[in-house]
Image (cartoon, rainbow, N blue to C red):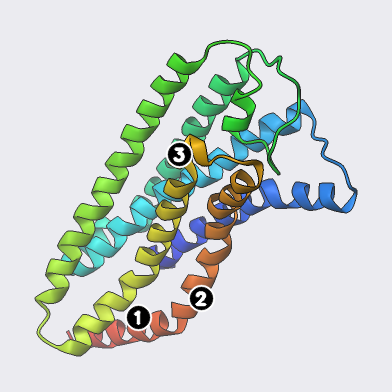
Amino acid sequence: HTPMFFFLLNLALSDLGSICTTVPKAMHNSLWDTRNISYTGCVAQVFLIFFFLGSEYFLLTIMCYDRYVSICKPLHYGTLLSSRACAHMAAAAWASGFLYSLLHTANTFSLPLCHGNALSQFFCEIPQILKLSCSNSSLRELGLITVSGCLLFVCFLFIVFSYVQIFRAVLRIPSEQGRHKAFSTCLPHLAVVSLFLSTGTIAHLKSPSMSSPSLDVALSVLYSVVPPALTPLIYSLRNQELKIISVDIEVHAGWL
């Protein structure tokens, strides 16, 4: 019933959704020694993976705002992050992920596909699908990448700006114990954001000359499976310390 754990619940749902979009089908194909997926299933897979990963990125941006308010504006925390405000922000993150995914999916599957039907991947990935297209889609794809890049870059700038303000506020705390507690509430979120951005950047900004089927599969696992699998672990490892910090804050609030 606190904003941080409310957003963690939404983050866990996005992690679960992204894992369930790719891994069960890949396991089924491996166990039954098949590589088949229906056209509808491929469309659904593209939509869902972008929906859940996009929503996760927007949720991580909102969670950065939660950490910023709790450390830099603690007296306004209850007002700025009321239950109503949290519900609206979470809904905005999911809606943004939906629109972001719909844009990519509609753009990809509006193209005619005529160069076979085999993808060198364990799930339907847009770059692999575009290789099957028989029309020149480079201009349209470039425009979509530009829009997506600008949107993601704005979120990235917001995260960087928030953490600059957070670190400045933490360094002004006189006691070492207070600084440690403040940093402890931010470390899990910072670790997850770094993991999410680094794996996605490595996977999508690699040189075309480095492309190979095995490397493409490894990098796809890196950004689509590893972050959702490790995020719960990162927060679980810090959960006990976060509980202790929450108790300490409540005690001090009682004294106030």
Callout 2 touching callout 3 (CB < 8 Å): no
Residue 207: numbered disc: 3
Q: How far apart, in angstroms, are the residues tagged by discs 2 and 1?
A: 15 Å
| Image position, residue 211 (x, y; %) | 56, 39
Q: Quadrant of the C terminus?
A: bottom left
Q: Indicate which label's residue lies in the foreground, 2 or 3.
A: 3
Q: Indicate which label's residue lies in the foreground, 3 or 1.
A: 3
The answer to whether residue 157 is left or right of residue 114 is: left
Going from N to C along the chain, the mark reached first, 2 or 1, is 2
| Image position, residue 208 (x, y; %) | 49, 35
| Image position, residue 96 (x, y; %) | 43, 37
Q: Is residue 227 above or below residue 29?
A: below
Q: Quadrant of the N terminus?
A: bottom left
Residue 90 seen anywhere in this rendered image of the structure: no
Q: Residue at x 28, y 56 (%)?
A: 65
Give the residue at mark 1.
246
Q: Is residue 146 above or below residue 12?
A: above
Identity, as a three-letter code, of the amino acid under mark 3: Ser
**In terms of secondary structure, where does tag 2 sit?**
helix
Q: Indicate which label's residue lies in the foreground, 2 or 1.
A: 2
**In terms of secondary structure, where does tag 1 sit?**
helix
**In terms of secondary structure, where does tag 3 sit?**
loop
| Image position, residue 50 (x, y; %) | 54, 39
Give the residue at mark 2.
236
Q: How far apart, in angstroms, are the residues tagged by discs 2 and 3?
A: 36 Å
Going from N to C along the chain, the mark reached first, 2 or 3, is 3
Residue 60, located in which quarter of the rendered image? bottom left
